[in-house]
């Protein structure tokens, strides 16, 4: 068994290497400041995606070994992890009262937003986006023309997608485009000019066009709408 003898406060790459050696699996590691989801482990197509709060960079070898054991077996109790989180609650940032990320649900009837988010994060953002994501509340009273398809809350670091998109006739590439658009808001700063604020700056529009199915998504929205 690989013995842990490192502290990871200066590099997540060291922790990634250790976890791969302990588990014998290839993995991607994203370190976040997300207080809603402190540790999540997902395996897809032979690669394990691990998202963890930065507090774990200061964890001892017993806690890391327990995480590695869970990754390797795909199950198991994690009492040391739970105790570590409890002892390090002061590391968690406070949220606004109106924002409740724990209530966000990513799994819809047809589409899983977390899976879409993780794929886009890996493909376009180097796994550096840390936002929570979930379906918003349904509002049947609002007309289709007035519906907002997605929102990004910078203060809460959260993305909400309109559940009107969670339908069989809405293509996956269009939902991916909406999620990609909102993820961009987390990386491109707002532009302020002459006292006016623009959330869709020229830089934002330039990067938006890097989405592989950009024109296809715009064409579908124009033709069918949501």
Image (cartoon, rainbow, N blue to C red):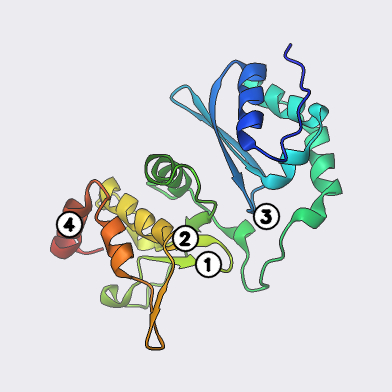
The kind of secondary structure element at disc 3 is loop
Mark 2 → mark 1, Cα distance in angstroms: 7 Å
**Mark 2 or mark 4: which comes first in sequence?**
2
Mark 3 → mark 1, Cα distance in angstroms: 14 Å
The mark closer to the camera, 4 or 1, is 1
Image side of residue 219 versus residue 91, left or right: left
Image side of residue 156 versus residue 66, left or right: left
Residue carrying label 3: 35
Which quarter shows the N terminus? top right
Mark 2 → mark 3, Cα distance in angstroms: 17 Å
Residue carrying label 4: 220
Mark 3 → mark 4, Cα distance in angstroms: 36 Å
- Classify mark 1: residues with Cα within 10 Å, few (<14), some (14-19) or many (20+): few
- Classify mark 2: residues with Cα within 10 Å, few (<14), some (14-19) or many (20+): some
Q: Nearer the viewer, residue 87 or 55?
A: 55
Which quarter shows the C terminus? bottom left
Image side of residue 129 versus residue 101, left or right: left
Residue carrying label 1: 154
Q: Residue at x 17, y 57 (%)?
A: 220
Residue 114 higher or lower than 164, as above or below: above
Circles 2 and 1: CB distance less than 8 Å?
yes
The kind of secondary structure element at disc 2 is loop
Q: Which mark is residue 186?
A: 2
- Classify mark 4: residues with Cα within 10 Å, few (<14), some (14-19) or many (20+): some
């Amino acid at each position: 068994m690989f013995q842990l003898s490192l502290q990871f406060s200066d590099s997540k790459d060291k922790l990634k290497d250790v976890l791969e050696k302990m588990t014998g699996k290839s993995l991607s590691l994203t370190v976040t400041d997300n207080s809603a989801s402190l540790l999540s482990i997902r395996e897809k197509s032979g690669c394990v995606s691990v998202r963890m709060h930065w507090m774990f960079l200061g964890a001892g070898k017993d806690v890391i070994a327990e995480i590695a054991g869970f990754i390797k077996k795909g199950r198991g109790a994690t009492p040391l992890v739970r105790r570590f989180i409890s002892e390090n609650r002061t590391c968690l940032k406070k949220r606004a009262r109106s924002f409740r990320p724990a209530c966000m649900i990513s799994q819809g009837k047809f589409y899983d937003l977390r899976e879409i988010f993780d794929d886009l994060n890996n493909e376009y953002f180097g796994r550096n986006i840390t936002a929570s994501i979930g379906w918003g509340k349904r509002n049947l009273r609002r007309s289709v023309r007035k519906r907002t398809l997605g929102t990004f809350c910078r203060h809460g670091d959260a993305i909400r997608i309109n559940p009107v998109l969670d339908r069989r006739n809405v293509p996956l590439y269009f939902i991916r485009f909406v999620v990609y658009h909102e993820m961009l808001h987390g990386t491109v700063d707002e532009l302020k000019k002459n006292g006016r604020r623009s959330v869709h700056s020229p830089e934002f529009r330039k990067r938006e066009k890097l989405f592989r199915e950009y024109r296809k998504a715009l064409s579908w929205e124009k033709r069918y709408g949501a």
